[in-house]
Image: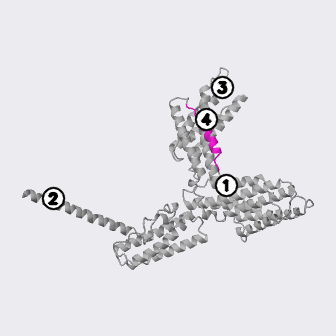
Amino acid sequence: MGSDLHQTAYHYRADFKMETAARNKKRSRAKRRKKSLFGKPFDGGKRMDHGGPQQQQQHPMEQQQPAYHPQHPAMMRLYEIQKEVASLGPQVCTFSGLQNDRDYKRLERELTRLLLDVDQVDTEGKPELQGARKRAAQEVEGLLRYLEENATHPSRLAIEQLSYEARQLVDERVVAPQRAGGVTEINDELVDALQQLVLRLTQVKTEGRVPLRKARYRALTRLCAVQDVIEGRTQQQTLSLPLSGDTHEAVNCINQVMVKVSVARSQLVALLMGLSGRDSCAHLSRILTEMQVELDALDVSGNAVIRNYRKQVVEEINGLLKHLDLEGEGDDTRRYDLAQNNSIREIEGVRAHISHLREGVLRHCVMGDLSFRPKAELQGLLTQLDQVDTAKNPCIREARRRAVVEVQAVITFLDLREALARRQPGPNEHPSHRAVWQVLGSLSELQAQVLGFDGKRVDKSYMILEELLTKQLLALDAVDPQGDETTKVARKQAVKFAQNILNYLDMKTDEWEY
């Protein structure tokens, strides 16, 4: 009988545990349902950066409803607000403008209204409704905060400042002279100034934020388009055109079209830089298309010279039309997300290969083994990088340039180590020349540390490396060649080598991103 009682008690305890586990599981599900009304709290746009909230979040009415008061008026009102929040989320997380933009004010107004609507929901003191209202308010507040942070971010302001400088430059040198009826002077100084602005825009850090990447991409594409238009104009100035009107009756018509193309070119530059208040891309596109129709209607059969002349003008019109597609490109595409770009992926693959070879070189150097010299493989990587299609994108060009510098740094390191190993100084070697080689030996050791450095500029090791490299430059500056030409050449090369190491260290730690 004792055995039966023991067995009964055992089964009772087992049943009790199962019932308890079932109740706990039910509570857990109910708790999750209560928290699922507005999903996860707003995460700074990270979910929306990768396809928008529609891909990451279920429709609120499709989610599991709270176990308590599912049809309560307050809960239903919160569902309606969530629908509006879900529609505004993607717009907020891809907005790339400033606070004075019309879209910013519209989004801010809509979100503020939703926040007031959430605040007016009557929860009747019920904890479940209060929690849902709190999560709704947090979601709206997160969107408002994200909108303001991106519009006032230092990088966004830097992009706007550089865009302003570009507008001032183009207005002064290109647009204003054309409007005054004069001739725009295109020279190397203007081209270099535009290129410098492109490089500065490329260096702006976006911290991976979609709005900042989008703003930088839009500014770069427009400035690069202006570069193309101006460079095309520079080439056109070198042609022996227009032809004389006495050559053929169609030449007068082509010459007139060329004058219109010149005006259209300045209008296009003004449009790209935001300097045209009345014209639009659609209007300019119609004008250029009409020019093409006018040229197509000309009878130039039997005259190859005039036919080629017309062809050149048509090609220039096509070149201008190509840039008019930029009007909505920044809004309609995700080209600013270069992490998905095939050229960038190819460059990253090369960089991974470089990293592997660099680690192998450093490992063998520590062991004193100079037999590992993958120079042929490194040269192959340079060839591969040279074949990467940058599509005239300055960010891709910069990424490729950095990868090339990484390859060249390993090659120069190997070359110097080999030169130091082969060096056999004679008894008549000039003392100054010997001093330069001593500095080069120190630079080789420091370059090995720079190649292996994987820190930041605030790190103590970075500061030590920078100080030691600077000291080697000072040591080279103190070398007196005493009229020895070989020493002069060697010192000049050593100074350039030291500066390259410093530049490479600087590049590794500037936290640049595409």
Q: Quick one: label 4 or label 1, which is nearer the N terminus?
A: 1
Mark nearer the N terminus (3 vs 1)? 1
Residue 158 in sight here = no
Query: Does the magenta run of residues contain 378?
Result: yes
Q: Dot 2: what SS?
A: helix
* Disc ID at residue 376: 4
**Position of residue 330 measured from the top left corner of the image (x, y, whole percent):** 62, 62
Of badges 4 and 1, nearer the viewer stands 4
SS category of the residue bearing label 4: helix
Considering the whole magenta stretch, tell me its main secondary structure.
helix
Amino acid at pointer 4: Ala
- Please state which amino acid type lies under the numbered disc 2: Tyr
* Outermost left residue: 1
- 253 vs 459, left or right, is right
Q: Mark 4 and mark 3: span between their CA atoms?
A: 36 Å
Residue 176 position, x and y percent, is 77, 64
Given residues 5 and 124, the one toward you in this image is 5
Q: Say which label, 1 or 2, has the lower sequence index.
A: 2
Q: Residues within 10 Å of mark 2 (few under 14, many from 20)?
A: few
Q: Residues within 10 Å of mark 3 (few under 14, many from 20)?
A: some
* Mark 1 residue type: Val
Q: Is residue 202 something that shows in the picture?
A: yes
The 10 Å Cα crowd at callout 1, few under 14, some 14 to 19, many 20 or more, is: many
Mark in the foreground, 4 or 3:
4
Give, as a single range, the part of the protein colored magenta. 372-389
Q: How is the image coloured?
A: one colour
Judge left or right: residue 88 versus residue 387.
left
Q: Which residue is mark 1?
A: 198
Looking at the image, which is closer to me, 295 or 459? 295
Res 180 → quadrant: bottom right
What residue is pinned by disc 3? 431
